[in-house]
Image: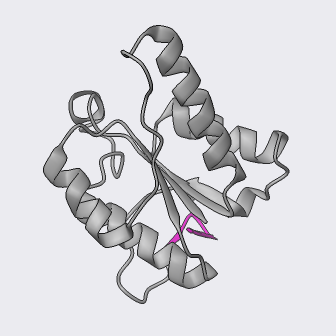
């Protein structure tokens, strides 16, 4: 399966100037569909902090993703447990795409290699959204 980390809420303010750190719902869908086609994947797990119902509905219609909901009343312990579960799910996925400049994405990429033995090429950050049938090449490395 493909796991995605799509950072939204605070990144609208603090990462506005970072190229490709903010991906729209349409761009996320393009990245996911491209990776799924390219690697023959079925199934999407989405780790996100999006609180926009319309945005989430658009992505759900397109990708039919699975997602862990935070349990309890949102205590610090509940948030930490949910975050750790999401890191493990994303780290164990066949492929992973995350949000540029996000420490959560960096943690997942590190866990994929160190704990789950995934290859470096099996995970990356979303950059310029791919065209429908185009392979995206950046810095000499093909993106997922």
Q: Is residue 75 magenta?
A: no
Point 57% across, 83% down: residue: 38
The percent position of residue 10, horizontal first and vertical second, equals: 28, 28
Side (left or right) of 93 relative to 86: right
Point 21% across, 62% down: residue: 58
Vertical order, 43 against 84 (above or below) = below
Quadrant containing the C terminus in the rendered view: bottom right
Q: How many marks?
A: 0
Side (left or right) of 61 relative to 138: left
Vertical order, 9 against 67 (above or below) = above
Q: How is the image coloured?
A: one colour
Vertical order, 17 against 2 (above or below) = above
Q: Is residue 26 visible?
A: yes
What stretch of residues is rendered in magenta?
Answer: 136-144
Point 74% across, 47% down: residue: 112
**Residue located farthest toward the left when viewing the structure as drawn:** 54
**Residue located farthest toward the front when viewing the structure as drawn:** 72
Vertical order, 39 against 78 (above or below) = below
**Residue located farthest toward the top when viewing the structure as drawn:** 76
The percent position of residue 63, horizontal first and vertical second, equals: 37, 68
Q: Quadrant of residue 143?
A: bottom right
Point 36% across, 45% down: residue: 21
The percent position of residue 109, horizontal first and vertical second, equals: 66, 44
Quadrant containing the N terminus in the rendered view: bottom right
The percent position of residue 107, horizontal first and vertical second, equals: 63, 34
Q: Is residue 137 magenta?
A: yes
Q: Is residue 129 visible?
A: no
46, 11: nearer the viewer: 46
Side (left or right) of 56 relative to 19: left
């Amino acid at each position: 399966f493909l796991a995605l980390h799509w950072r939204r809420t605070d990144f609208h303010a603090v990462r506005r100037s970072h190229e490709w750190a903010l991906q729209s719902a349409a761009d996320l869908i393009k990245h996911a569909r491209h990776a799924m086609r390219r690697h023959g994947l079925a199934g999407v797990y989405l780790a996100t902090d999006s609180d926009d119902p319309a945005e989430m509905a658009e992505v759900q219609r397109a990708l039919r993703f699975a997602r862990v909901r935070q349990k309890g009343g949102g205590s610090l312990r509940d948030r930490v447990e949910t975050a750790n579960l999401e890191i493990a799910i994303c780290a164990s996925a066949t492929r992973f795409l995350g949000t540029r400049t996000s420490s959560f994405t960096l943690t997942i990429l590190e866990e994929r290699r160190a704990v789950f033995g995934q290859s470096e090429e099996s995970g990356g950050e979303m950059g310029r959204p791919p065209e429908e049938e185009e392979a995206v090449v950046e810095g000499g490395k093909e993106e997922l």
